[in-house]
Image (spheres, rainbow, N blue to C red):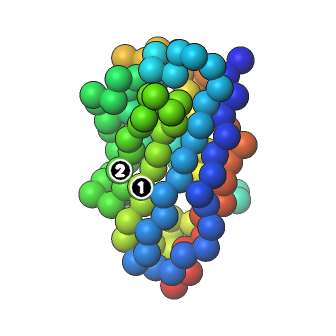
Amino acid sequence: QVQLVESGGGLVQAGGSLRLSCTASGRTFGSYAMGWFRQTPGKEREFVAVISGNGGATYYADSVKGRFTIYRDNAKNTVYLQMNSLKPEDTAVYYCAGTYSGSRIYHFDNQYDFWGQGTQVTVSS
């Protein structure tokens, strides 16, 4: 089973930026599509962004399009989420997830095979 470790969360003021990182175990990272999701208490987990295994395709939720950028470095087994122009409504626990179907772009959480533990992002107004 692939292990994912997220980092980079924290507290930031509205309008600020954060970069989340997610590093995977194993030797076949480039064969996994990787996504970011987020969740707030009492709400369902929400799709944020996804990137294909070779980095050639990305897809974003409308709520973050133009503000967030997902990218990856397969040599470092790491996927990133650059978050700019943060808003208080971006406050959530952010999770990275992966699927063995590296060429597919999925945005439903039940399509992912392995998950990280989550990292808290808090945006103050």
Q: Is residue 115 visible?
A: no
The residue to which callout 1 is attached is: 82
- Tag on residue 51? none
Q: Is residue 89 above or below residue 83?
A: below
Q: Residue at x 67, y 40 (%)?
A: 5
Quarter containing the N terminus: top right
Between disc 1 and disc 2, whose residue precedes? Answer: 2
Element carrying mark 2: strand
Where is residue 101? Give x, y as percent: 47, 15
> How far apart, in angstroms, are the residues tagged by discs 1 and 2?
5 Å
Where is residue 121? Give x, y as percent: 60, 64
Q: Is residue 7 shown left or right of residue 125?
A: right
Q: Residues within 10 Å of mark 2 (few under 14, many from 20)?
A: many
State yes or no: discs 1 and 2 in contact (Cβ < 8 Å): yes
Q: Amino acid at mark 2?
A: Thr
The residue to which callout 2 is attached is: 69
Q: Residue at x 42, y 60 (%)?
A: 83
State the residue in front, 115 or 77.
77
Q: Residues within 10 Å of mark 1 (few under 14, many from 20)?
A: some
Q: Is residue 14 shown left or right of residue 60?
A: right
Q: Residue at x 53, y 30 (%)?
A: 77
State the residue in front, 104 or 16.
16
Q: Residue at x 39, y 33 (%)?
A: 51
Q: Is residue 48 above or below residue 58?
A: below
Q: Is residue 73 above or below residue 21?
A: above
